[in-house]
Image (cartoon, rainbow, N blue to C red):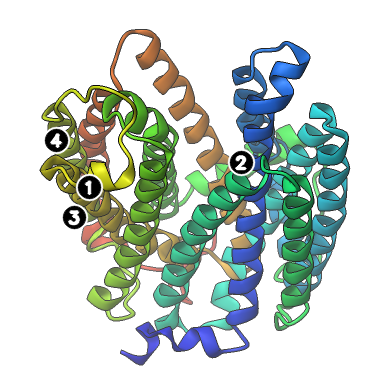
Amino acid sequence: MKSASLDLLTARRFLPLFATQFLGAMNDNVLKNALVILVIFKLADASGMNGQLPATAAAGIFILPFFLLSAMAGQLADKMDKRILAIWVKASEVAIMALAAIGFFAESIAILMTALFLMGVHSTFFGPIKYSILPVHLARGELLAGNALIEAGTFLAILIGTILGGVLILPAGGIVMTTALMMAVALGGLASSLCIPSAPPAAPDLRIDVNPFSATRSLVRDACADRTIWLSILGISWFWLVGATFLSQLPAFTRDVLGADEHVVTLFLTVFSVGIGLGSLLCVRLLRGDIAATYVPLGALGMSAFGIDLFFAASAVPIHGGGLMTLGAFLGHFHAWRIVIDLLLVAVFGGLYIVPLYALLQARGEESHRSRIIAANNVINAAFMVVAALATAIMLIAGFSVPTVFLTVSVLNLAAAAVLWPLSRGAQPRGPGDQALGV
């Protein structure tokens, strides 16, 4: 179908938003990975601290604003023209990158952590904009395709940002190259945001609740009032829990289990990102533009099946003597291709799983409070990712191997398929005559 094609990438009502989101996600990850690499390999040794401590703190610092400010972000996105708000957010990114540049040149962990926190704030405020603006500018039959492209683009941006942040920062002149890249990307994001078409306020008379605790409690309570919306949020949050677990453990899995070097990690990240994109586009083709959760349980089952097989594939890996295997040496083994295929298919089924849930969330929510629904989703997403980090740490402390962590998450993922089964059987987007949520 035309609505499911890549034609949206040539449309002004979609391309500027896609470019703005892509560049923002890329910059997030350039900054995060450059910071972590610089701290672990240079600044920690110079200051006599354990590099893992600030590296671990970086993840928490970035996600903290999602808990504190998502409610306000959702309220503002409903109250204001989303285009104007997007421009303000992207202008702030330019200032944040300037602060990060100062931190890199001064080799100041405190300044860099401050910049990372502010980028978390930036992402917190942009999240409700990007997802709530799609139903404004896209026809109903284009909503799946729009979400698929956003998801595919996000994972590609994460991959590119992660690689560039790690590769550029340490060589001679690396700080200059890294900061120049971040500033150029931020300016590009600001320029693309200026081209986003207007999206008039959905609730211009909304009163902003500045108390983050009461606002967040109200946000989550109202999201719970609609079973379809709540199940969609839980399903999306579970996806990010699974994805965060796999992505965070790939470096240790590659080095400690497979005995391979950092180039194999890059291969795995690339395969995972490509798989998400393929699965997202496959979903659009299967559903032919229809907004339904039909294939969500199948996506969850596929993620589990190939996640479980990844455990057995890793268990069959022969012990490798000597140094770490290069990419070429790794791919010379039969078991390597089984692992690559497992990771690819976990991601493909992940894309099939996640895209309909986002589209259903957008289509089901009333326009007047759609941004706040997205904000509630972001709060729950952040909570699930924190749980993922804590649970993974507990399992590793308890002696679980990384493949066993993958196995545990994959088995638990079967429960997600069961929970979301009713959603696939009868949930439909809210029609014009349906009663709105009491927000």
For the residue marked with disc 3, what is the amino acid? Leu
Q: Nearer the viewer, mark 3 or mark 4?
A: 4
For the residue marked with disc 4, what is the amino acid? Ala
Q: Nearer the viewer, mark 3 or mark 1?
A: 1
Cα separation, mark 3 vs mark 2, equals 33 Å
Residue 33 shows which numbered tag? 2
SS for callout 2: helix
Cα separation, mark 3 vs mark 1, equals 30 Å
- Residue 253 vs 278, above or below: the answer is above
Residue picked out by circle 4: 313
Residue at (40% x, 68% y) in the render: 429
SS for callout 4: helix
- How far across and down, in percent of the image, does residue 239 sit? 38, 45
- Residue 104 vs 143, above or below: the answer is above
- Nearest to N terminus: mark 2 or mark 1: 2
For the residue marked with disc 2, what is the amino acid? Asn
SS for callout 1: helix
Residue at (61% x, 41% y) in the render: 33
Is residue 301 visible in the rendered image? The answer is: no
Q: Nearer the viewer, mark 3 or mark 2?
A: 2
Cα separation, mark 2 vs mark 1, equals 26 Å
